[in-house]
Image: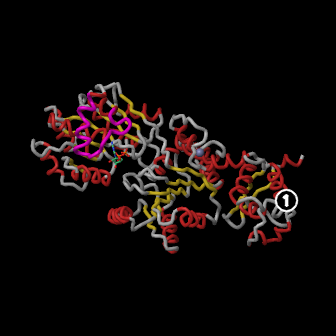
Amino acid sequence: QGIPLHEAYSKYSGILRSVFRFKQFRKNQLEAIAATAAGRDTFILMPTGAGKSLCYQVPAIVQKEEKNAITVVISPLRSLISDQVAALVAKGVKALGITSETNDSVVYKSLFSRESRPALLYCTPEKIQKSTPLHNGLVHLYRYGRLALFAVDEAHCIFTWGEEFREAYRSLHTLRDDFPEVPIMALTSTASPEDVAHICRRLKLKNTRVVRQSVNRANLTYAVKHKRRGELFDDIIGFLEESHRGHSGIIYRTGRRQCERLARLLAKKGIKAAAYHGGLTDQESKSIHIKWKKGIHRVIVATIAFGMGIDKKNVRFILHCDLPKSLENFYQETGRAGRDGKPAECVLYYSFQDKKTILDLESWSQDGRANPALDDKVAKVVQFCEEKSICRRVLLLQHFGEAFDRKDCGNGCDNCMHRARLVSRDFSAEARLAIALVQGFENGTRGNITVRQGVELFRGRDTLNTRKNGRRHNMHYGAGAALSHDLATLIFDRLLKLNLLVEFKVYTNGSKYHYYIKVEASLYT
Ligand code: ADP
Ligand code: ZN
């Protein structure tokens, strides 16, 4: 497994106290250190914020003291590198970063001088590819036995799914080819058991000690809410004002233009928001990062380009306005909330429309060019959204190959709340009335209705929608007046899920269309 834990403790806990000023190792840190101290390859799977970095930083300092050897950390982002290096330097640890912005020759020189050789050298995967100056330098150090460890941070970046994929990560197997004696540590917060095996194979790890810790983020609350056409903005404002006044958070949208538009609308409402996406210049994105860290921007409306490497602890909410590309993405993106351990809320807005858009795209690309792996990932997200009874946390952890020992996460995810409410009462009478209400619209004189209009009518709301076309004269108008909006919506959604109600698409003018609802034909017989 590694060197005995008590031995590891007596050897490494001094550094933990004197350099990092922490009293104790956290769960699994010592196990990881003991394994790498024995020269083994290690795979560290711990949730965000658990303290992965310490697993290589503490041994690195000891290796430097004992052997004057360096630990090379491969990290995907400049901003991550500069944050980590600055934090170490502030603690008096010799650390250097090589990015496209640093003066490489100064860095290389320091590698070969006994006095200035750093304990930790951070670089991007591109900088360490074969026959780069850094690679050549490391070959030299290797000959003299001065390479202690390669730490591959955010190791999931080798996967082609998701936006974080980096081609250079995939060629990191050359580390094993070119430096066979140097142990490797891979670290990530997102990996299913198959992913772990895949990463180990790709990096050519041997006899690997996998230190795996539950990826459950107990302080995050998950919910999937209904994204209704034309209501998303009001819902977001409501969410920000009611639950997150003054809090920082990230809103994810897929399109650049959508990000800018939403940020502008929020700003109009007096919410300090900025848009962030791949179309910004380096200068612009840097400035947004800084203002966000300082709390000048309270809300960032971003494409997935914003995310990795944001070390802001007090992010209180993450909103997804569109379907994430995969559950891994969803986990990573929501993982940016609550890094201080305090409660944070993650809401995904989902609509049948989103699903249909994806299905349309899918059928459109059925000419052999479709990416089946990607489709499968998206299908899993849709499944996750449509599930209305199993706890969200259970679903997520299941996806990462983890069993959760309780049925109820105890942290108010929408499904747990709904279950609690639904079992407390029998809603079949209300469900029947809702069906009858929809049926009342099928003779055509009062026009078709959407789910949202159905809910409003059912609850007997007095709105433009319910007044239109004399819709309120439906016999069952107001039959569900005692129900909350959420509960009434839930009943309609259940009916759709059970295929008692069905949606159908009607083009209104040109390419514009609505989804209306009707009663499933077989119910009439
Ligand atoms: P991860 O990489 O797993 O997301 P980090 O390595 O960035 O997490 O650590 C998260 C935070 O926890 C950091 O602020 C770090 O200083 C702190 N931390 C790590 N180990 C300990 C420890 N043993 N005791 C107290 N704080 C710790
Ligand atoms: Zn739950």
- Left or right, residue 433 beside residue 416: right
In the image, is the residue at mark 1 within 8 Å of ligand 2 by its beta carbon?
no
- Residue 10 position, x and y percent, is 24, 32
- Residue 209 position, x and y percent, is 36, 28
| Residue 123 vs residue 187, the one in the foreground | 187
Q: Quadrant of residue 5?
A: top left
Q: Quadrant of residue 276?
A: bottom left
- Left or right, residue 72 beside residue 406: left
Instruction: Give the residue at x 64% y 55%.
Output: 351
Check disc 1 and report its element: helix, strand or loop: loop
Instruction: Give the residue at x 51% y 35%.
Output: 402
- Residue 41 position, x and y percent, is 31, 30
Figure quadrant of the N terminus? top left
Q: Is residue 503 shown in magenta? A: no
The residue under label 1 is 442
Magenta-colored span: 7-30
Compared to residue 370, the image places residue 487 above or below, namely below
